Amino acid sequence: MTICYIGEASTRSGLSPDTIRYYGSLGLIRSGMRDRGGRRQFDDEGVAWLMFLRQMRATGMSLEQLRMYIEAREQGAAGVSEVLEVLRQHQQSMLAARDEINHCLQVVAAKISKYERLARTGQSPGAPEV
């Protein structure tokens, strides 16, 4: 088991030290390990948790959803159904976002095709299209 301080935890997790401190102030980090000077310490499991938080935030999970996830998770077996509900709702949000991105990618691909054609023919773009 590797123990590290916030700087290394930041590097390993991809979260800034300020974000780690902020998440700690919100109660999203439950690790209680501190050294004699009061500095927070992270073991491998703690760093893995930080990475999970980063991944969930990167996919658009709100801080409130994370809080709900953590509270339900801490209930053990009694909270499993609530954890599933939070994750399923987030999955649906991610799928909707993916559909929107796919649509936007199609629009951009069409614009690229149009402007490649215009570049080949020397034509002007004309009026904007939506």
Image: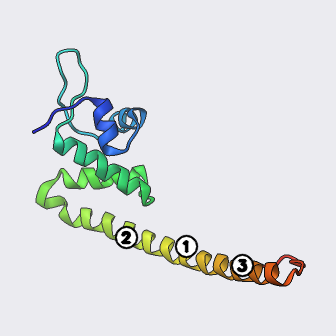
- Residue at the farthest top position: 37
Q: Few, some or many C-alpha atoms within 10 Å of disc 2 (few <14, some 14-19, many ≥20)?
A: some
Tally of numbered tags: 3
Q: In which quarter of the image is the N terminus?
A: top left
Q: Quadrant of residue 116?
A: bottom right
Q: Residue at x 28, y 37 (%)?
A: 9
Left-right relation of 21 to 103: left
Alpha carbon separation for disc pair 1 and 2: 15 Å
Q: Nearer the viewer, residue 126 or 124?
A: 124
Q: Mark 2 points at which residue?
A: 91
The mark closer to the camera, 3 or 2, is 3
Q: Name the residue under label 3.
A: 111
Q: Which of 62 and 102 is in front in this view?
A: 102
Alpha carbon separation for disc pair 3 and 1: 15 Å
Q: Few, some or many C-alpha atoms within 10 Å of disc 3 (few <14, some 14-19, many ≥20)?
A: some
- In the rendered image, residue 77, in percent from the top left (x then y), is placed at 11, 60
Query: Could you say whether the residue bearing mark 2 is in a helix, strand or loop?
Result: helix
Determine which of the numbered discs, if any, sits on residue 4 in the image: none
- In the rendered image, residue 104, in percent from the top left (x then y), is placed at 61, 75
Q: Residue at x 51, y 78 (%)?
A: 99
Q: Which of 118 and 51 is in front in this view?
A: 118
Q: Quadrant of residue 25?
A: top left
Three-letter amino acid code at disc 1? Ile
Query: Could you say whether the residue bearing mark 3 is in a helix, strand or loop?
Result: helix
The first of marks 3 and 1 along the sequence is: 1
Left-right relation of 82 to 56: left
Q: Residue at x 21, y 67 (%)?
A: 81
Three-letter amino acid code at disc 3? Lys
- In the rendered image, residue 86, in percent from the top left (x then y), is placed at 32, 63
**Res 67 seen here:** no
Alpha carbon separation for disc pair 3 and 2: 30 Å
**Res 53 seen here:** yes
